[in-house]
Image (tube, coloured by chain):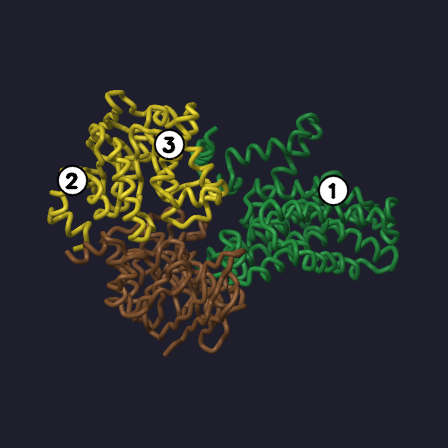
Chain colours: A brown, B yellow, C green
């Protein structure tokens, strides 16, 4: 059952279409992987879905509401959250305070007072294994910790749909495994996910389905095994070294 | 060409690097791999004069450059392509590239090298009048490498080449770097993507917790069981 | 601990009680200084709401001060209203003005916002200069009130009110929203914060208190003209005091006002030449040694000097 649908979404900057006529469904409880070369429109698509950018054409619907045309804070209130490719911590706050903002705002029905918000934030931090850094200043974290805080903040918003933008960038293989595991546990909590990634190991292990963008348009979509072996995807995105390694 | 002997360094009271030794021979491609927090950035910062070491020596072609300021080290012929590209986003691709040749005075040489960069990366020639910030991640990486090469360095250091890049982009960059190497450039690649690093480099060093734990020809390191498990995710 | 929680409010009430006896005890000169100090403290503390918590450094809050002064003036002289009717208006009119002006202006960020707000203040002065009802260049003469103690208590009450608002901001959901906007407005919006609404409310509350202060000031000095109440130096003073003490904290701007107003008073009598340089010197000091304000440095306790040295080093001086 599709809880988020995008129909013919187009986003133009001047004459250039960054996203062109993209249509997809996000099914309840699934993890949809979104891959494509740099500049293929993945982040732009997420920006349009979450209201950070207005669509030039097309419609996005979520849970019966039209998202296109709504300001981003209202989309957040409806239950759609996202992380940013370049993380945006609230630097002068502590880690737990950062997550509290998510708990206080986010989807309707959240904490109205600081004490409850703090409790909820601490629970989320424990879930992402960052509770030991709760009182640390947000700008004192290392790369994997920053990514996990960004994730915790988005989770604290009680989303039904969570869009992750390259959360694995900069992580080593062991950290990637831990992140994949964490994302699966998020799905188990009842969150539907759309994951943008370049780390193929993660995409392979996470995705129920994969959508491939190329020059702003849908190249193909389907089951990982099919998509990742598709010769057009190899030619446009995966490259010969990946194909050689996959064969080895 | 670059020799690092028993280098120790850190920030304030926190010691990051302990007794690190490695060498990059002239005309080689050498890579240093390791996880986040292993000390790779600290090592580069120390070599390039941003951090003062607490012990050990860094030598470039026999000259001791330990603790010298960054401007002096750049003047001696080390150029770094920084992590995350760090282009000047509001300047055009062409302007970014020409800025790479800031210290040079040979107009003809600069023009010739610019043509060479455009041969290596045709897409840069196509986009040369676009602001650098409007390029995709892979194109920006090409521009950053081009900018580094325009300085005509003796040693090119690449910090996290693969960060946030699509697999196919890496193919293009690896091919380009092999070509550059073929023309005699010495390259030191600091990298988290071990597979790509070992494809490019002939010699590798593995850094963990500030120590070098493994080193040797990359074709041997590739089959080392520890490396396979911890870094190649196999 | 249960007892601890009551310490601050009790101490504050005690201090207020002591302060309350001042009019009977101190000389008129000192009383005047204290009233002026309260006024600057309210201005700094109210600027803190939009500048400190929300991170929108308004360079035009004196506009609200002046509008409040003139609202008071016009209502008392032309409409013959008594104090207790005119004063609330002195707070309300600038508040509405700020909400309206804020619609376009709060869309600007950083330097552009600062310049636009500065422009608003300058424009207000020019408008008042040229309009009949405000007495134009000639100004307004207010009814005389014989008791300086009245102004003392009015300013003190306003100061208590604005401080309580700051306290509320520091522990409320709304306050968290403002801080999130300051730290990263895009992320704040993505997290469900209606940034336009929150910014406007903060701006309006800040304006209301500036206006109230202006109203009391007008009645206190009994004569106002555009140059008296739309002085850019007042904006600069309130910003420097807030930043010097610690923008974004509850107590910082108060501390800043206390220290700087006292210093400035001493200097203007002892070393007039230095008084001219005063504001500039303070700005340099803050930027080099204590960018987060005096409060932050004091909190480091014994580590204060080390903290200041570290700040200096970070700026590579």
Q: Are marks 3 and 2 on the same chain?
A: yes
Cα gap from disc 3 to disc 2, whole angstroms = 39 Å
Compared to residue C135, the image places residue B151 above or below, namely above
Q: Which residue is mark 1?
A: C231
Question: In the rendering, at what x and y percent does residue C219 appear?
Answer: 80, 50
Q: In which quadrant will I find the C terminus of chain A?
A: bottom left
- The answer to whether any part of residue B70 appears in the image is yes
Q: Residue at x 83, y 58 (%)?
A: C75
Residue picked out by circle 2: B213
Q: Nearer the viewer, mark 3 or mark 1?
A: 3
Crowd tier of the residue under label 1, counting other residues whose Cα lies within 10 Å: few below 14, some 14–19, many 20 or above: some
Report whether mark 3 lies on the same chain as mark 1.
no
Q: For this view, does B83 lie left or right of residue C309?
A: left
Residue at image point 34% right, 26% down = B73
Q: Tell me where residue A218 appears, x and y as whole percent.
A: 38, 65
Residue carrying label 3: B113
* Mark 2–mark 1 distance (CA, rounded to whole Å): 67 Å
Q: Secondary structure at mark 2?
A: strand
The x, y position of residue A213, in whole percent, is 37, 62
Q: Decide: marks 3, 1 in contact (CB < 8 A)?
A: no
Q: Which is closer to the viewer, label 2 or label 1? A: 2
């Amino acid at each position: 059952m599709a809880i988020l649908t995008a129909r013919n979404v187009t986003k133009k900057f001047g004459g250039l279409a960054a996203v062109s006529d993209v249509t997809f469904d996000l099914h309840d409880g699934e993890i949809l992987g979104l891959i494509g070369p740099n500049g293929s429109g993945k982040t732009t698509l997420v920006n349009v879905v979450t209201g950070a950018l207005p669509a030039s054409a097309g419609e996005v619907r979520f849970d019966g509401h039209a998202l296109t045309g709504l300001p981003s804070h209202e989309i957040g209130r409806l239950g759609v959250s996202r992380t940013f490719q370049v993380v945006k911590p609230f630097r002068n706050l502590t880690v737990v305070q950062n997550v509290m903002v998510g708990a206080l705002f986010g989807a309707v029905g959240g904490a109205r007072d600081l004490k409850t918000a703090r409790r909820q934030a601490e629970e989320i931090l424990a879930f992402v294994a960052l509770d030991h850094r709760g009182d640390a200043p947000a700008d004192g974290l290392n790369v994997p910790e920053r990514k996990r805080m960004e994730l915790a903040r988005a989770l604290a918003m009680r989303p039904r749909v969570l869009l992750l933008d390259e959360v694995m960038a900069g992580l080593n293989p062991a950290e990637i495994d831990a992140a994949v595991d964490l994302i699966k546990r998020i799905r188990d909590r009842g969150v539907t996910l759309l994951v943008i990634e370049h780390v193929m190991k993660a995409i392979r292990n996470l995705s129920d389905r994969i959508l491939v963008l190329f020059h702003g348009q849908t190249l193909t979509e389907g089951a990982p095994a099919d998509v990742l072996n598709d010769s057009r995807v190899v030619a446009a995105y995966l490259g010969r070294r990946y194909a050689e390694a996959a064969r080895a | 060409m670059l020799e690092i002997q028993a280098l120790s360094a850190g920030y304030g009271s926190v010691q990051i690097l302990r007794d690190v030794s490695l060498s990059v021979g002239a005309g080689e491609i050498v890579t240093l791999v390791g996880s986040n927090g292993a000390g790779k950035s600290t090592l580069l910062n120390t070599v390039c004069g941003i951090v003062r070491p607490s012990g050990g020596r860094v030598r470039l072609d026999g000259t001791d450059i330990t603790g010298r300021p960054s401007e002096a080290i750049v003047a001696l012929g080390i150029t770094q392509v920084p992590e995350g590209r760090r282009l000047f986003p509001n300047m055009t691709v062409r302007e970014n590239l020409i800025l790479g040749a800031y210290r040079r005075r040979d107009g003809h040489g600069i023009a010739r090298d610019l043509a060479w960069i455009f041969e290596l990366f045709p897409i840069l020639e196509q986009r040369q009048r676009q602001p650098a910030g409007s390029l995709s991640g892979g194109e920006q990486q090409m521009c950053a490498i081009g900018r580094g090469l325009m300085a005509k360095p003796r040693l090119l250091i690449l910090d996290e080449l693969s960060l946030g890049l699509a697999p196919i982009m890496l193919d293009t960059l690896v091919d380009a770097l092999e070509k550059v190497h073929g023309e005699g450039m010495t390259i030191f690649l600091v990298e988290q993507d071990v597979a790509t690093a070992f494809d490019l480099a002939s010699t590798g060093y593995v850094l963990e917790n500030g120590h070098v734990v493994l080193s040797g020809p990359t074709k041997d390191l590739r089959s080392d069981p520890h490396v396979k498990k911890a870094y190649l995710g196999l | 601990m249960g007892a601890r929680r009551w310490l601050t409010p009790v101490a504050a009430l005690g201090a207020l009680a002591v302060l309350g006896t001042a009019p009977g005890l101190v000389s008129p000169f000192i009383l005047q200084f204290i009233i002026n100090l309260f006024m600057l403290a309210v201005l700094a503390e109210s600027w803190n709401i939009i500048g400190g918590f929300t991170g929108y450094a308004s360079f035009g809050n004196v506009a609200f001060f002046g509008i409040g002064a003139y609202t008071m003036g016009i209502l008392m002289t032309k409409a013959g209203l008594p104090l207790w009717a005119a004063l609330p208006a002195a707070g309300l009119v600038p508040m509405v003005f700020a909400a309206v002006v804020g619609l376009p202006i709060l869309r600007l960020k950083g330097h552009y916002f600062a310049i636009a707000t500065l422009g608003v203040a300058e424009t207000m002065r020019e408008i008042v200069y040229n309009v009949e009802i405000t007495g134009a260049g000639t100004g307004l003469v207010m009814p005389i009130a014989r008791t300086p103690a009245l102004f003392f208590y009015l300013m003190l009450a306003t100061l208590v009110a604005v401080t309580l608002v700051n306290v509320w901001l520091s522990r409320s959901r709304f306050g968290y929203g403002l801080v999130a906007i300051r730290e990263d407005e895009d992320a704040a919006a993505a997290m469900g914060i209606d940034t336009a609404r929150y910014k406007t409310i903060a701006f309006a509350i800040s304006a209301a208190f500036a206006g109230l202060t202006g109203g009391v000031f007008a009645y206190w000095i009994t004569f106002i003209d555009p140059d008296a109440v739309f002085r850019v130096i007042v904006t600069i003073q309130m910003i420097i005091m807030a930043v010097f003490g610690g923008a974004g904290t509850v107590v910082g701007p108060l501390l800043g006002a206390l220290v700087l107003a006292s210093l400035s008073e001493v200097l203007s009598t002892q070393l007039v030449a230095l008084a001219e340089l005063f504001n500039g010197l303070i700005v340099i000091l803050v930027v080099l040694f204590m960018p987060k304000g005096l409060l932050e440095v004091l909190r480091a306790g014994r580590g204060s000097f080390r903290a200041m040295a570290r700040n200096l080093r970070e700026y590579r001086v």
